[in-house]
Amino acid sequence: MDPIHGLLYGLSRAIEPQMLLMGFLGCLWGTMVGVLPGIGPVAGITILMPFTFGMDLTPAMVMMAGIYYGAMYGGSTTSILVAVPGETSSIVTILDGHQMAKQGRAGAALALSAIGSFIAGTFGILGLTFLAPPLAELAIGFGPPEYFSLALVGLSMSSFLSNASLAKGLAMAVLGLIIGTVGLDIVSGQPRFTFDNMELAGGLDIVSILIGLYGISEVMEMMASKIRPHVRHEKLWNLRRLLPNRTEWKLSIWPMIRGSVMGFFVGALPGAGGTVPSFISYAMEKRMSKTPERFGKGAPEGVAGPESANNSGAVGAMVVLLTLGLPYNVVTAIMLSSMIAHGIFPSPLLMARNPEFFWTVVASMYIGNFLLLILNLPLVGVWSSLLRLPYRWMTVFIILFCIIGVYSIEYRGFDLLIMAVFGGIGYIMKRVDLPAAPLALAMVLGPIMEKSLIQSLIMSDGSPLIFVTRPFAAASMILFFSLMFLPLIQKKLGRRIAPVGEVDM
Amino acid sequence: MASHKACYIFELYFITLYFPLDNIFQFCYEDSTLCNREAMRAVNRISSVVLLAFVAFYTAAGRGLDTWAKNAPGPGFMPRILALTLGVLAVLIWVEAKPSSESPDEVESYSKREPLIIFLLVLAYVFVMPQLGFLLSNFLLVIALRRMVEPGSWRGDLAGGIGTALIIHLIFVEILALQFPVFPVWWER
């Protein structure tokens, strides 16, 4: 099926009432979790993930994709209105978005953010439509050594991107891989680390662990930090106040286009997702501006560029998932585990074997973008009023949703216990500065990595040289080792790469 | 020109990999209070020791697994590589904890009571729910959470507890037909 026919077929499926409903619910929930500080797209998807197990895979993925980019849209609302980022990719929006709000241009900032996100999302989806098929064709030639080295690079990048030190990030990634070794060995079928417990034979349930790490521990963190945003009430639902003026439009249109293009390609790189493109876009716009001194004081480009970049970056991350079957951030890792739970193993052949699934998900993103524009702009007043919800009620509902979600997977008390224990562990990890993202990603990538490592060694009669004799695997390995040793070399040379904050912000 | 721009974007991508997001978070949360560097160092050392203890446990638990079987890696191959790597990383975390002028000086202030209560209540729920059933356990959990974390009036909390338990029951058990043990074990008998 060529891209045009695939897309038309996908559109015909995506406008079915069930798909529209799932897309709408996903966008609604995604915007909500994006708006609420503390609950990001990861927690938003993990909490709802068990409820998707009873559905067919296509509507389930349509809903999850809606949550992902809905959270990207919603995250900017709190950044602009109250200077509290709903999720990490909206952090940079605070710099100019909140300044615009202070100058009485909150409506314009929100509109630029929503329209920029819409343009970027649409561009990203076009990129996905036309670039995914050739990329998948290229990836058909990949064997176990390529998969192992690509997964290794993805994992090391995610450790790099965590806020903690590289050693801590990598330690958490290894811990995640260790969790993946519990259960039956994939080659011999021999039980490993099960301690004669039947419930451990199938391995530790990833969803229960993720809900503990991201749902329960987030609630504990929310209650511990006692951070409550103070909402300045502005009458934002008057549409006239939402429209940017001519100058703001003129200044923003090119940053939107540049952010969309750059965000898509950077988002597809390991570990980038939506966050890294937003930082790059901000730095890029500031450097390209003739008046960089306006940045940080309410420059519309500082909102339009990063917001566009983070949305197309989110779609870029989906390209790698749907064509290679490799998740490069936690959200796509969760989507992968959901696909596996439904019996579909994403690979370069996904488009050929399951075209209806692939194209319906892609087409539903187009429709989701329209839904989000409608949901976000006129209803911005409603979303901002969500911040006034009493936290004690929010915690109650999040905890109940986590419990019900985990228990409904297999109706086992053991899974609830895993969730509770990992909720506690997740909270301690936050307090001692150990990042959860590499652990979560490694749990999902672990079985893929072990399988491809063993297959590679069988192919080479036990010689690890197979990873350096095949060009793509060798290139990935060079990237991996440079990532590992770059900080050491820099330290030896007494130099440090100046962070973006010092250079450009 | 285009290749120059592409190089610039890649340069920024790698620079951003080194960018500590905490720097940005700090100005979002202006209430944060000072905490000394020593505490952070101690925390790193404790993390290192805990990880090393875990490596010892993991290695001992997997000692019966073969590293190599016939012409292929055995079930103990991956676990041994992982244990060794984690051990090295735990030592690195210990080494990193040595005094450094670059250690962060500020961390957020936080309360210990609420998270502990939430954790204990969720843990208690795990053991109580199969005995008391979904309806009663949810009611008790809501009441306990509200009374212990951010209490309102008794009447409001009770009404909220009953209402929440009934709504959750209606949605998940009656409409979505999830198979929860609705009533206590003794009631079912």
Image: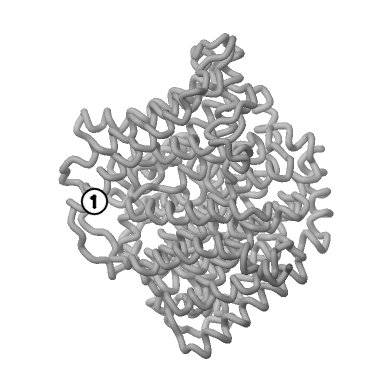
Of the pair B22 and A392, the residue shown nearer to us: A392
Estimate the x, y position of residue B71 in percent, counting from the top left.
59, 10
Q: Note whether A467 is above or below A498 in the view shown.
A: above
Residue denoted by label 1? B40
Is A128 located above or below residue A15 in the figure?
above
Residue occupying the point 64% across, 71% down: A375
Q: Which quadrant of the figure has residue A364?
A: bottom right
The disc numbered 1 marks a residue on which chain?
A: B
Vertical comparison of A275 with A475: above or below: below
Which residue shows up at 61% across the image and 19% down it? A455
Q: Amino acid at mark 1?
A: Met
* Circle 1 Cα neighbour tier, 10 Å, few/some/many (<14 / 14–19 / ≥20): many
Q: Quadrant of residue A197?
A: top right
- Horizontally, residue B88 falls left or right of residue B149, namely left
Q: Residue at x 52, y 73 (%)?
A: A394
Q: Is residue A301 above or below residue A203?
A: below
Return the x and y of residue A384 as percentages of the image width and height: 51, 76
Question: On the rendered structure, is A168 left or right of A375?
Answer: left
Name the image colouring: one colour
Where residue A374 sits in the image (x, y, percent)? 66, 70
Helix, strand or loop for disc 1? helix
